[in-house]
């Protein structure tokens, strides 16, 4: 079994992956942003606490005008580390003993991230000046106070992770819902495909009816498929039916011919007969056999001509034959029949062209058309064959003075076994394959054949074929007229 | 007995007509549906052999029109189509039998004869009236076990009369059913044949079998030993 791919699954997975990617990006962005915000808040709180520590540095009220740290009213986080010292390095107060941090001279504030006892701390180094007794005439004593205040960064991380976790959970929830809704929606959206498939499943060789369901026709993506299916099936059905009709007609034709042969022989053997009767009976049976043979021969010819040209012509190079010679042969062949019914056949053809048909088929084409014209001509009338060569093409017309052709016959006269008016039975119309063979020959050569009524009465068969110039000698019409 | 053959294929028709005539049936041939329909509706045939694919009017339509006119002549269809549906639809539209082409000529003859027999209410090929025995297959006649030597026309008259026991059969009816259009026929021909037939049937002082009803026709008496 080949690996099958589910569009539903593919779509859902694609959407989920996209959603996941955007969620990850979003969470990343949020983390960075949150980190910054929280860091600002963190720093602000460091500054605020440090400032309040600065404020807690008090005059000790002694002669030396030293300072002390008065921790009353100052709130310091429990795990915060700090140290307050004056310009002499005297530690005024400390907690958790933060490390000595080098400060670059200038700045009043500086932040440092330092590892203390395995914990990440962020320290603020705040330098300020505390003036003791500013009201005194000497302007008071100023003390340079340095405060190092730090709090563990884990607080910051905690805040950031809280915020990110919220987003992550919301995203996961959203993705779950999306997966379900997507699966349902896609399945629902693909329902027309299933309907189309169900409808298509009903097609069998006996039932070709296919009507694409309206749901499929109303779906923009499926419309071309549905239309293509409908059209393809209609074409298939037509050719299938044509084939079936051909087979039926061929079977009918053959059965009838076989029935004739069989009945002739059985009639002969019904009782003892004279030698003469046997002779006559055998002659008739032989005639019947010849007819059966010619029916089979014509069917085989048609089958050969209807084969794809590749398989046929690849065996030999495309052959050309002289149209003039062919017409001459066809006229010569049908002469006894034409004379029998005193029909005058005239040829209007100057010059010569070569047509891309092998000479056997070309003769078949010309003589079939000519015989058809003769069969439909009243006694004593005329049949005119005319050839007009054009640029790379040639047009052959055969015109009779018969009763013409009805519109409905025109449509199907080239179909195999079509005999036109059903009142014309087999004996006058042959097997009904002649014109089909003509059509097959023309189409194989890349030409066309059609039949129409002449304004002056009678039918005109027109054949258009691709043609090549041939070495010309315009003696045909004169020589034929001379005959 | 007279049979109508409606078949457009000329050679096949020639053969069937020849075979039917050789078995002692009178045959008319129509080459298209219109003519066939027209002839069939004369109601003078004892059986009709009908081809399906006919120019002018299809065999199916000929059959339907015949049955619509309440004519019950047995019809045997000749067809080159063998599909079940077409056979079913044929039988449903009033055909009595069918044969598909290519058929066996002997089988066709046997089926036509069987159709004629059954239409006349007889189911076996040997017909018996009192001490007379007529074999339709061998075309022989025996009375009291003795074979009688009848001419073909005499045989056909007797066969027709036996098929219609107790009924009065007019000369016209005999003419219609024993001769096809190809024959020159006159009613006094029938009279001559009947008198010959009577003479040949009359052996050893048996009762005369054929009654003559003046200006009405003939009747085969069922009497003697049977009653």
Image (tube, rainbow, N blue to C red):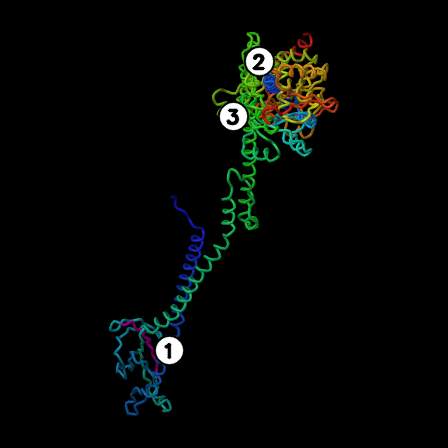
Q: Which residue is mark 1?
A: A45
Between disc 3 and disc 2, whose residue precedes?
A: 2
Q: Are marks 1 and 2 on the same chain?
A: yes
Residue A122 colored in magenta in the image: yes
| Residue A309 marker | 3
Q: Is A366 or A88 nearer to us in this picture? A: A366
Q: Chain of mark 3?
A: A
Which mark is first along the chain, 2 or 1? 1
Magenta-colored segment: predominant secondary structure: strand
- The residue beneath circle 2 is A284
Q: Which one is nearer the viewer's eye here, B101 or B144?
A: B144
Q: Find residue A325 and report its horizontal and vertical position in percent.
A: 60, 13
Q: Is residue B226 above or below residue A7?
A: above
* Relative side of A57 to A226, left or right: left
**Segment colored magenta:** A119-129
Q: Residue at x 67, y 7 (%)?
A: A483
* Horizontal side of residue A188 vs B169, given as left or right: left
Is there CB contact under 8 Å for labels 3 and 2? no
Relative to A379, is A237 above or below?
below
- Could you classify mark 3 by the number of other residues whose Cα lies within 10 Å: few (under 14), some (14-19), or many (20 or more)? few
């Amino acid at each position: 079994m080949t690996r099958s791919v589910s569009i539903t699954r593919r779509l859902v997975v694609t959407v989920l992956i996209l959603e996941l990617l955007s969620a990850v990006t979003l969470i990343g962005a949020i983390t960075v942003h949150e980190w910054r915000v929280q860091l600002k808040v963190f720093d602000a709180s460091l500054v605020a606490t440090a400032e309040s520590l600065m404020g807690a540095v008090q005059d000790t009220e002694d002669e030396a005008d030293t300072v002390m740290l008065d921790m009353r009213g100052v709130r310091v986080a429990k795990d915060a580390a700090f140290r307050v010292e004056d310009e002499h390095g005297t530690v005024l107060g400390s907690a958790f003993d933060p490390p000595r941090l080098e400060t670059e001279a200038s700045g009043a504030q500086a932040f440092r991230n330092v590892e203390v006892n395995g914990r990440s701390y962020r320290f603020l180094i705040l330098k300020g000046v505390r003036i003791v007794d500013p009201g005194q005439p000497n302007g008071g004593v100023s003390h340079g106070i340095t405060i190092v205040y730090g709090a563990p960064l884990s607080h910051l991380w905690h805040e950031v992770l809280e915020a990110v976790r919220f987003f992550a959970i919301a995203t996961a929830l959203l993705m779950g819902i999306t997966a379900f809704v997507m699966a349902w929606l896609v399945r629902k959206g693909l329902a027309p495909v299933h309907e189309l498939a169900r409808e298509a499943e009903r097609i069998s060789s006996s039932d070709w009816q296919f009507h694409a369901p309206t749901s499929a026709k109303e779906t923009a993506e499926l419309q071309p498929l549905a239309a293509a299916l409908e059209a393809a099936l209609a074409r298939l059905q037509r050719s299938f039916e044509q084939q079936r009709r051909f087979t039926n007609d061929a079977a009918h034709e053959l059965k009838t011919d076989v029935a004739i042969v069989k009945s002739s022989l059985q009639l002969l053997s019904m009782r003892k007969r004279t030698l003469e009767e046997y002779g006559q009976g055998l002659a008739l049976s032989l005639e019947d056999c010849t007819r059966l043979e010619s029916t089979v021969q014509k069917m085989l010819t048609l089958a050969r001509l209807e084969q794809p040209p590749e398989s046929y012509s690849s065996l030999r190079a495309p052959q050309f034959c002289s149209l003039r010679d062919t017409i001459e042969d066809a006229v010569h062949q049908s002469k006894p029949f034409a004379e029998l019914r005193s029909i005058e056949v005239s040829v209007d053809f100057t010059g010569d062209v070569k047509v891309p048909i092998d000479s056997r088929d070309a003769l078949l084409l010309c003589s079939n058309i000519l015989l058809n014209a003769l069969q439909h001509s009243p006694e004593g009338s005329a049949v005119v064959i005319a050839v007009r060569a054009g640029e790379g093409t040639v047009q052959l017309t055969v015109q009779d003075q018969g009763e013409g052709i009805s519109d409905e016959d025109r449509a199907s006269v080239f179909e195999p076994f079509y005999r036109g008016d059903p009142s014309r039975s087999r004996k006058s119309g042959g097997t009904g394959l002649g014109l089909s063979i003509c059509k097959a020959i023309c189409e194989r050569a890349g030409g066309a054949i059609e039949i129409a009524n002449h304004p002056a009465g009678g039918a005109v068969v027109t054949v258009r074929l691709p043609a090549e110039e041939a070495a010309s000698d315009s003696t045909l019409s004169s020589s034929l007229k001379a005959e | 007995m007279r049979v109508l053959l409606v078949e457009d294929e000329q050679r096949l028709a020639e053969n069937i007509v020849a075979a039917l005539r050789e078995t002692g049936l009178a045959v008319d041939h129509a080459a298209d549906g219109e003519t066939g329909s027209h002839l069939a509706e004369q109601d003078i045939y004892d059986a009709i052999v009908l081809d399906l694919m006919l120019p002018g009017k299809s065999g199916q339509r000929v059959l339907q029109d015949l049955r619509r006119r309440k004519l019950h002549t047995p019809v045997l269809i000749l067809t080159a189509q063998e599909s079940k549906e077409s056979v079913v639809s044929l039988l449903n539209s009033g055909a009595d039998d069918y044969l598909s082409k290519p058929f066996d000529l002997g089988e066709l003859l046997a089926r036509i004869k069987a159709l004629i027999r059954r239409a006349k209410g007889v189911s076996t090929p040997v017909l018996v009236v009192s001490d007379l025995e007529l074999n339709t297959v061998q075309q022989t006649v025996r009375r009291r076990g003795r074979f009688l030597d009848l001419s073909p026309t005499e045989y056909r008259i007797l066969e027709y009369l036996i098929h219609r026991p107790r009924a009065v059969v007019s000369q016209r009816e005999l003419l219609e059913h024993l001769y096809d259009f190809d024959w020159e026929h006159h009613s006094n021909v029938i009279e001559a044949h009947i008198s010959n037939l009577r003479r040949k049937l009359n052996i050893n002082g048996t009762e005369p079998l054929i009654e003559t009803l003046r200006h009405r026709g003939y009747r085969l008496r069922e009497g003697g030993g049977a009653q």
